[in-house]
Image (spheres, rainbow, N blue to C red):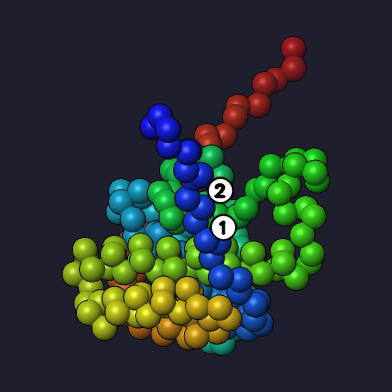
Amino acid sequence: MPGRPNKPPDIEAPPPSLVPIPEPPEKKALRRIVPTHVALLLETWKGVPSPELTGPLGKAEAAFAAGDYATALTSLDLLAVRFAEPRWPSLPEPFRLLRVAIPTPVPPHWDPDHALAAAEKDAKKARKVADGQLTLARACVAWASGHGVDTSDLAPRLDAAAARLSEPNGLAPFYDEVDLLWTGLRGRLPAPKVGKAPAAPPPTADVEEA
């Protein structure tokens, strides 16, 4: 307005920094296996995901139940690669977070975090991973609630986890809430239906030499 000095735009405060914490293999597997399970229940697959997708999930589930977390993570890694393959339908947000990350190569000086100290980079990465976990947890609870799964005791944990994440150094209590949510939801999910395996290509006829 004339005669009124321009007001600078409001700048949102950055989220509190989070100190990274160790991620035991059993927790790492739990935090991936449940949202991956829900991802294979989505309408994306028209109710019958390919055995090439349900097979690795089944192996991951069996290995996790047996306490073989290394094998569970290997199977989940395979699924993350397959989720990123162009031959499959693209997962909706936020389940795209389950795909293997394929970073675009850029010059180092284009990376806004290039000049940060290692500890600051680790803190930003920890925050990003935690934000992704909360987003996936919200989506999984929403899917379950909309498909007849009782989540009345799990939904409050979302609010508790979000509150923890807004606190400095709140990463450990955040994952306490999220891990309880994943554990509670895991036993309530239906098994994905298994579609037919892709047909093998027809054999090519040998061409006789003249």
Q: Which mark is residue 56?
A: none
Q: Position of residue 27 (x, y in %)?
A: 55, 81
**Residue furthest top as drawn:** 210
**Element type at mark 2:** loop
Name which residue type carries label 2. Ala
Q: Which mark is residue 84?
A: 2
- Asked whether the beta carbons under mark 1 and mark 2 sit within 8 Å of each other, the answer is yes
Q: Quadrant of the N terminus?
A: top left
Q: Position of residue 196 (x, y in %)?
A: 39, 51
Residue visible at 61% across and 74% down?
Answer: 18
Q: Which mark is residue 80?
A: 1
Above or below for 205 versus 5: above
Q: Quadrant of residue 123?
A: bottom right
Viewer-closest of 111 and 135: 111
**Element type at mark 1:** helix
Left or right, residue 176 beside residue 191 = right
Above or below for 198 versus 116: above
Specify few, some or many for label 2: CA neighbours under 10 Å numbering under 14, 14-19, or 20 or more.
some
Q: Visible in this render: residue 92?
A: yes
Viewer-closest of 6 and 45: 6
Name which residue type carries label 1. Ala
Q: Position of residue 15 (x, y in %)?
A: 54, 65
Q: Visible in this render: residue 197?
A: no
Q: For marks 1 and 2, give the CA distance.
A: 7 Å
Above or below for 50 versus 182: above
Residue visible at 67% across and 21% down?
Answer: 207
Callout count:
2
Q: Position of residue 20 (x, y in %)?
A: 65, 76
Viewer-closest of 25 and 172: 172
Residue visible at 25% across and 77% down?
Answer: 151
Left or right, residue 135 beside residue 156 = right
